[in-house]
Amino acid sequence: MYQPRTIPKESFDRLQLAALAGLMFLGAAFVFSATVANDAAGTVRWFDQSWVRQIVWYALGLGAATAVCVVDYHTLARWSEVAYWASILTLLVVLIPFIGKTHGWGARRWIDLGPFQFQPSEFAKLAFILAGANFLSRPPDELKLPEIFWKGIGLMMLPFVLILKEPDLGSALVLLPTGLVMMLVAGTPRKYLLRLLCGVGILGSLFLADVLFAPPALQIKMQEYQRQRLLVYFGVDFAAANATPQAKKEARRLQADRSFQSRQALISVGSGGLLGTGWGKGKQTALQFMPPGAAHNDFIFSVIAEEEGFAGSLVVLALYAVVLFTGLRIAGQARDRLGKLVAVGVVTLLFSHVFINIGMNIRIVPVTGIPLPLLSYGGSSVLCSLIALGLMQNIHIHRRGY
């Protein structure tokens, strides 16, 4: 059983903190750049502008991260089951029509709390990491039992299904690598994981075949905008082969409309060149080829790439690399399996967000609504990212004393 240490607490991981400071600075600067180009920004009071709100969320997130560091992560883990079921409750509540708020394509992902909107899926990811780490930090022999394996899968799939129901495919998908990597590091038999991955791979292949090639009557039921994003990514014509000329013309118009954001993001990235056009001088944003609601949110990387070029993009990637590699170092230095699993879960979650978001900006993955940690505008995302990194600092503070 864990016994609290009596030796003095050690310092924070300063290298990771420096990288976080760099990301927050860039986040505030480029949210400002991406929003002041919008004509409507001049009519918004300064304290209601997105870049000011982003700084406020940074301040609140740093306060929450500091509070997390004060409490030993073992104490936090003892409350992980409560946090997990509370997050499941919020995921259920957000699906209620008169409570959950819809945006964009009609996804019901937010709860309106007046001054701000709360996104339960972001907090569910954190709760899952804590609960999953607490569940998996049991004796290694128990992890070999099939019932423990399936309980771990159930712990992951419950929030996955509820988030998918909103629908929020991007947020749901990042739970899968996070949970599976945690199970692998915990010591779950690889044969269980390999069989599971093979099954998922087969189901995924059948799903894609259905989306891309099956006639409408036989297609799996899903949101039409999700199907269209997949068709755009794989370059499949929206119109059926036997469609009338008028229907094909309409399908081409719709396909151009649905691929607009991804094409403009790719143009932004390519037009930046080596050193970019300069901060605040991005033409794609200024001329609103990149829609104002997307430029400072899911597509902020394309704004940075256009204005700061390849060099600026490398700086962003380097800062994320520092955060992730220091996170792996913290996991390696953790004093117990619980700390290691929490750190590995946070690192995998952040990596998944970064990979998917930047991937959709450069069109190597389909477009999905998933933010770039600490750079994209958004209160729930910023708050949860900083709390997650506060957890890693907590593990570093309570690391091994040798």
Image: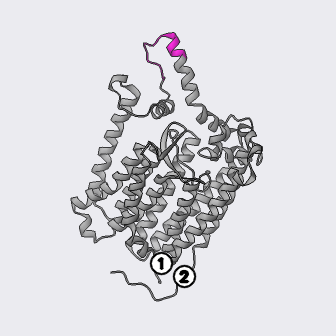
Q: Is 156 or 193 nearer to us in this picture?
A: 156
Q: Main secondary structure of the magenta part?
A: loop
The numbered dot on residue 10 is 2
Compared with 374, 226 (above or below) is above
Q: Tell me the residue at 65%/64% (across/down).
A: 21
Tell me the quarter of the picture where residue 291 sits.
top right
Please report the bounds of the magenta region as a residue range. 237-249
Dot 1 falls on a residue whose secondary structure is: loop
Q: Tell me the residue at 44%/18% (across/down).
A: 240
Q: Quadrant of the N terminus?
A: bottom left
Q: Is residue 244 magenta?
A: yes
- Name the side, left or right, on which 186 lies relative to 148: right
Dot 2 falls on a residue whose secondary structure is: loop
| Residue 38 visible from this viewpoint | no
Nearest to N terminus: mark 2 or mark 1: 2
Q: Is 325 or 375 nearer to us in this picture?
A: 375
Q: Is residue 401 magenta?
A: no
Q: Tell me the residue at 63%/41% (across/down).
A: 293
> How far across and down, in percent of the image, does residue 18 sit?
64, 67
> How far across and down, in percent of the image, does residue 87 sit?
41, 58
The numbered dot on residue 399 is 1
> How far across and down, in percent of the image, does residue 130 sit?
41, 65
- Name the side, left or right, on which 52 lies relative to 118: right
